[in-house]
Image (spheres, rainbow, N blue to C red):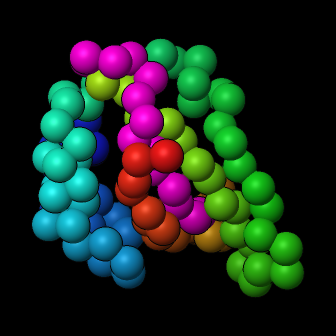
């Protein structure tokens, strides 16, 4: 959704808990490069950590984004997934340059 610029879909998925579609769009535009899909193997190498004591279970994930100009970029998406394989919620914690 980030790569194709579907910020409204991201806002709907995350229920606009922290970042609105406009906030996300602004971060991508300010970075000034074209987002592209990362190599497939990157999805198997997520930087994740279980949130201790969370109910429902939750995992915090940090994922480096990729751009046409740079490949792996300094723009990082941080998000939390709560729930299980049957029912889950996604919340974007931050979209920033590391």
**Residue at image location 20% in from the left, 31% down from the top:** 33
Q: Is residue 4 visible?
A: no
Where does the image place residue 78, in percent across and percent down from the top left?
Answer: 51, 56
Q: Name the residue nearer the viewer: 45 or 68.
A: 68
Asked whether, in this view, residue 18 is left or right of residue 36, the answer is right
Where does the image place residue 86, in percent across and percent down from the top left?
Answer: 61, 62
Name above or below for residue 32 compared with residue 41: below
Q: Name the residue nearer the viewer: 8 or 85.
A: 8
**Residue at image location 17% in from the left, 55% down from the top:** 25
Where does the image place residue 40, in percent across and percent down from the top left?
Answer: 51, 18
Name above or below for residue 10 compared with residue 64: below
Q: Please provide the residue range marked out in magenta.
A: 68-81
Magenta highlight on residue 14: no
Asked whether, in this view, residue 11 is left or right of residue 39, the answer is left
Residue 5 image-quadrant placement: top left
Residue 11 image-quadrant placement: bottom left
State the residue lying farthest toward the right: 53
Which quadrant does the N terminus fall into? top left
Asked whether, in this view, residue 57 is left or right of residue 7, the answer is right
Residue 13 image-quadrant placement: bottom left
Name above or below for residue 54 compared with residue 60: below
**Residue at image location 25% in from the left, 17% down from the top:** 68
Where does the image place residue 17, in percent across and percent down from the top left?
Answer: 38, 80
Q: Name the residue nearer the viewer: 14 or 76.
A: 76
């Amino acid at each position: 959704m980030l790569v194709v610029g579907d910020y409204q879909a991201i806002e709907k998925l995350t229920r606009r808990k922290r970042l609105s579609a406009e906030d996300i769009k602004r971060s991508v535009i300010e970075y000034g490069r074209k987002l592209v899909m990362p190599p497939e193997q990157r999805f198997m190498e997520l930087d994740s950590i279980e949130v201790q004591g969370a109910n429902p279970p939750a995992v915090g994930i940090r994922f480096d984004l990729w751009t046409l100009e740079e490949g792996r970029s300094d723009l990082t998406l941080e998000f939390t997934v709560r729930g299980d394989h049957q029912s889950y919620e996604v919340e974007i914690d931050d979209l920033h340059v590391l």
